[in-house]
Image (spheres, rainbow, N blue to C red):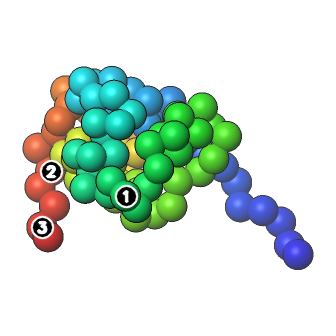
Amino acid sequence: MGNPRPRQRRLAKKLLEIRRALGYSQIQLVKQMGVDGILAYHRISEYESGRREPALWVLLAYGSLAGIHLEDIVDDNRDLPEKLPGKVKYSV
């Protein structure tokens, strides 16, 4: 089976910080990400509590909505920008 990959210690906290900084409820976040009907809003709670780890496409949606680089979210050695949304623009 091999060893499981290490989990990011700060990921859940960062996801919660992003949502709160943007001023969204969990339902509003899913709608703003454009994944309503694809991602159940209760998953957001699981991500923010660390019970579940989001898929890469979900992390990309967080980054795009927050205007920050994916590395800011997933790298435990990097902090989120002080002001959200940031200035990073994702092209579609």
In the figure, is residue 82 to the left or right of 1?
Answer: left
Q: Is residue 61 above or below residue 16?
A: below
Image position, residue 21 (x, y; %)? 27, 24
Tell me the amino acid under the disc marked 1.
Gly
Question: Label 1 vs label 3: CA separation?
Answer: 23 Å
Question: Label 2 vs label 3: CA separation?
Answer: 10 Å
Assess disc 1: are there few (<14), some (14-19) or many (≥20) residues with their C-alpha within 10 Å of its C-alpha: few
What residue is rendered at 63% in x and 47% in y?
A: 52
Disc on res. 88: 2
As helix, strand or loop, the secondary structure at mark 2 comes to loop
What residue is rendered at 52% in x and 45% in y?
A: 43
In the figure, is residue 50 to the left or right of 69?
Answer: right
What residue is rendered at 11% in x and 55% in y?
A: 89
Assess disc 2: are there few (<14), some (14-19) or many (≥20) residues with their C-alpha within 10 Å of its C-alpha: few
What residue is rendered at 32% in x and 57% in y?
A: 35
For the residue pair 9 and 54, the one nearer the viewer reads as 54
For the residue pair 58 and 8, the one nearer the viewer reads as 58
Whether residue 69 can be seen here = no
Q: Is residue 69 above or below residue 85?
A: below
Q: Is residue 18 above or below residue 91?
A: above
For the residue pair 36 and 17, the one nearer the viewer reads as 36
Q: Which of the two discs, 1 and 3, sits closer to the camera?
A: 1
Disc on res. 50: none
Q: Tell me the residue that label 3 is attached to.
A: 91
Tell me the amino acid under the disc marked 2.
Val
Question: Label 1 vs label 2: CA separation?
Answer: 26 Å
Q: Tell me the residue that label 1 is attached to.
A: 37
